[in-house]
Amino acid sequence: MAEDRDFSDEWVEAIGHYITGFAYVELLVYELYDLLPADRLSKHGRDHRDYSDRVRLMQALLRSVSWSQRKVLDQLLDDTLEFSTLRNQIAHNPMFIEVWLDDAQEKVKINPVITHAQKGYNLEHITLELLNTKLEQLHSVSSDIAKVVSEIREGAP
């Protein structure tokens, strides 16, 4: 007999996939640094603690290489910054349960969310639906980056 999945199983799965999916993107960025010509700042730049700093430096370094994929890669790297923000929000903020009364159905409704503060202490909610949508987008972008990295690697001396 199959066990019923509850909302926590869905959250655990989505969070796990998102965190590991973004880790793969970070790995690809490190690989890009290794593919840069040795006379570049690549070895130093890859050690930036902040992901957005590593991406911005990589984008600057892309301007000095002759890779045909550099414009596409620049845009893909830019796209990853949003995923980085969401990854940090997921990893560093608590989950809450919103509870309210649905007057139309005369039922109590619950909605688990990850909540994080925005500027001015406004709370923003990350729903499971939003997380799954972003996860699909993350997989698409990481797949595209992996293809570009593979093309560069195959063309590298």
Image (spheres, rainbow, N blue to C red):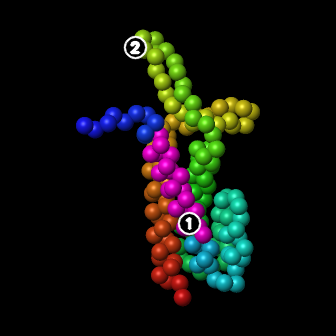
Q: Can residue 104 be seen in this snapshot? A: no
Q: Which residue is mark 1?
A: 27
Q: Main secondary structure of the magenta part?
A: helix
Q: Is residue 128 magenta-colored?
A: no
The kind of residue tagged 2 is: Gln
**Quadrant (top left, top right, bottom left, bottom right) of the C terminus:** bottom right
Camera-side residue: 123 or 64? 123
Q: Which residue is mark 2?
A: 105
Residue shown at 52%/21% (left/top)? 99
Query: Which residue of the protein is positioned furthest toward the right in this rendering?
Result: 120
- Residue at image position (47%, 76%) is 151
Of labels 2 and 1, earlier in sequence is 1
Q: Amino acid at mark 1?
A: Leu
For mark 1, give the secondary structure. helix
Q: Image quadrant of residue 120?
A: top right
Residue 10: quadrant of the picture: top left
CA–CA distance in space, label 2 to label 1? 48 Å
Q: Judge from the rendering whether residue 128 lies leftward or rightward of residue 39; answer left or right.
A: left
**Quick check: 81 above or below 103?**
below
What residue is at 46 percent from the left and 16 percent from the top? 108
Tag shown at residue 58: none
In front: label 2 or label 1 = 1
Span of residues in magenta: 11-30
Q: Is residue 111 visible?
A: yes
**SS at mark 2 in the image:** loop
Callout 2 crowding tier (Cα within 10 Å): few <14, some 14–19, many ≥20: few
